[in-house]
């Protein structure tokens, strides 16, 4: 029997991620013995061993690694289907039946483009309601896959567009955002080498997939934190030119002459059949 129930998949995912039956059972809010039996029954039905169990603990087999990878995608797809269905029917507590689209945008990027897109689309007949969902750096991919977003503004080369459909909207240069009183802020232009290793002003570090790259700069969680640390002279950051829209008086933006261009794309799941989404994409490509 090839069918795999969502309940079974969630049980397996908890064990595979925790690599400990006790912690997995606690995470699932159930006792350990029935969880162990459920995994054993799943292995018998699939005809494969998913876990190696010994006195040292639990480890994934090759088949278990495959199911962990594929299972995450399957759970994301199921969660996305529920979220998008609710948004389409207004059944998620918004108090209305008007169709909605969740648009993920990176904080501080493409501000003017976003405003133009929202204004132009709102003028379209039968336009859906647009919920703007701020995202962290490189978070938009996950938001599209698990249904937190229907569409996103993403930026190459920082974002990966594999598996999505997309249209290019804008190309721009990059700037270094510096404390206004720092000596580098007096330059008309800078290079990446100029800002890459400044002992008293290390580059801010953003997480990707939950981890921060190595380096001396502060670990940044959100735009407000970054803005304050730059104003205090503790860090600097590199952003697309459009980030000038959120600068404080204590900041200075200096163009980077050798930084690669940033291309803004409107991006959506390749399987989408939403008419409202199609209308938003048409509007975006006409800007």
Image (spheres, grey):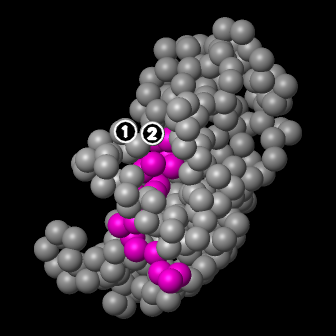
Q: Are marks 2 and 1 in contact (CB under 8 Å)?
A: yes
In which quadrant of the rendered view does residue 184 lie? top right
Q: How many marks?
A: 2
Q: Provide the residue designation for mark 2.
A: 20
Question: Is residue 91 visible to us here?
Answer: yes
Rendered-image quadrant of the C terminus:
bottom right
**Residues packed near mark 1 inside 10 Å, few (<14), some (14 to 19) or many (20 plus):** some
Front residue (pair 31, 18): 31
Q: Is residue 181 above or below residue 65?
A: above
Task: Give the extent of the magenta segment.
Answer: 1-19
Q: Is residue 219 above or below residue 111?
A: above
**Residues packed near mark 2 inside 10 Å, few (<14), some (14 to 19) or many (20 plus):** some
Secondary structure at numbered mark 2: loop
Q: Provide the residue designation for mark 1.
A: 23
Furthest toward the top, the residue is 200
Q: Is 10 inside the magenta-drawn segment?
A: yes
Q: Is 38 inside the magenta-drawn segment?
A: no
């Amino acid at each position: 029997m090839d069918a795999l129930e969502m309940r079974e998949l969630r049980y397996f995912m908890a064990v595979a991620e925790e690599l400990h039956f006790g912690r997995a059972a606690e995470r699932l809010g159930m006792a350990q013995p029935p969880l162990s039996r459920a995994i054993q029954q799943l292995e018998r039905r699939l005809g494969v061993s998913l876990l190696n169990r010994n006195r040292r603990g639990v480890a994934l087999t090759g088949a278990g690694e495959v199911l962990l990878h594929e299972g995450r995608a399957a759970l994301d797809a199921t969660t996305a289907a529920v979220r998008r269905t609710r948004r389409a029917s207004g059944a998620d507590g918004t108090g209305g039946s008007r169709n909605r689209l969740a648009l993920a945008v990176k904080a501080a990027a493409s501000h003017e483009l976003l405003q133009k897109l929202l204004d132009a689309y709102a003028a379209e007949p039968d336009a859906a309601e647009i919920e703007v969902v701020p995202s962290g750096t490189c978070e938009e991919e996950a938001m599209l896959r698990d249904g937190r977003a229907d569409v996103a503004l993403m930026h190459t080369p920082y974002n990966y567009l594999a598996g999505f459909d997309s249209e290019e909207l804008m190309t721009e240069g990059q700037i270094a955002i510096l404390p206004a009183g720092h000596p580098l802020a007096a330059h008309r232009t800078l290079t990446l080498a100029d800002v890459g290793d400044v002992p008293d002003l290390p580059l801010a570090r953003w997480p990707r997939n939950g981890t921060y790259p190595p380096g001396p700069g502060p670990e940044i969680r959100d735009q407000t934190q970054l803005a304050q640390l730059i104003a205090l002279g503790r860090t600097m950051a590199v952003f697309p030119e459009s980030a000038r829209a959120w600068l404080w008086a204590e900041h200075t933006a200096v163009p980077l002459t050798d930084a690669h261009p940033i291309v803004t794309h409107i991006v959506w799941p390749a399987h989408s059949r939403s008419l409202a989404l199609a209308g938003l994409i048409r509007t975006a490509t006409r800007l």
